Amino acid sequence: MANPSGTTFADPSAQPARHEPANPPTAVAVDIYDGIYHLHGTDPAHIERLAHIVDSKMRAVAARGGTVDSLRVAVLAALNITDELDSLRQRYDALAGSVSQSQRNLRSRAGSLAHMLDEVLTDTPNREDVRKVG
């Protein structure tokens, strides 16, 4: 399975990709919760960062919950990561909406100012070289 960063996760049943990325995938071995995983992607450093995040989350969940079942730890870590992602998406959506509103306000204000400037320039006596701005 690939994501926008070009990272793929080994899946023996997966079909080969139909189109090759600009940089060929590189194999990277990462250690997540005392297990070695062989992953492929175009940015090994990115894969290692992601693996470190997952490993850290799993260890934090295991330390808090006292569970040793790696599947349970993985599911709880996934829920924690998903909660963080959801919170960040909500913040992004709120900020994007705020930026859009600010852009609309600025465009409206610029239009008003251009109109006012046109009126001032049009009302200027004895000027034959008056140009309209808007």
Image: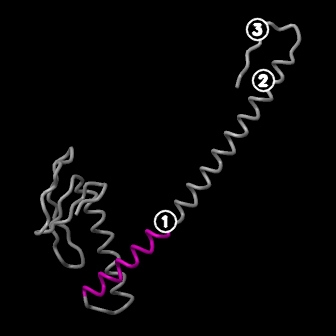
* Label 1 to label 3: alpha-carbon separation: 54 Å
- Mark 2 vs 3, N-terminal side: 2
Question: Residue 41 appears in which quarter of the rendering?
Answer: bottom left
- Mark 2 vs 1, N-terminal side: 1
Indicate the secondary structure of the residue bearing disc 3: loop
Per the rendering, the mark at residue 61 is none
Q: Residue drawn 24% across and 53% down?
A: 43
Question: Is 71 one of the magenta-colored residues?
Answer: yes
| Residue beneath disc 2 | 118
- Residue type for callout 1: Leu
Residue 29: percent from left, percent from top: 16, 65
| Residue beneath disc 1 | 88
Per the rendering, the mark at residue 129 is 3
Residue 99: percent from left, percent from top: 60, 50
Q: Nearer the viewer, mark 1 or mark 3?
A: 3
- Mark 1 vs 3, N-terminal side: 1
Where 107 falls versus 121 (above or below)? Answer: below
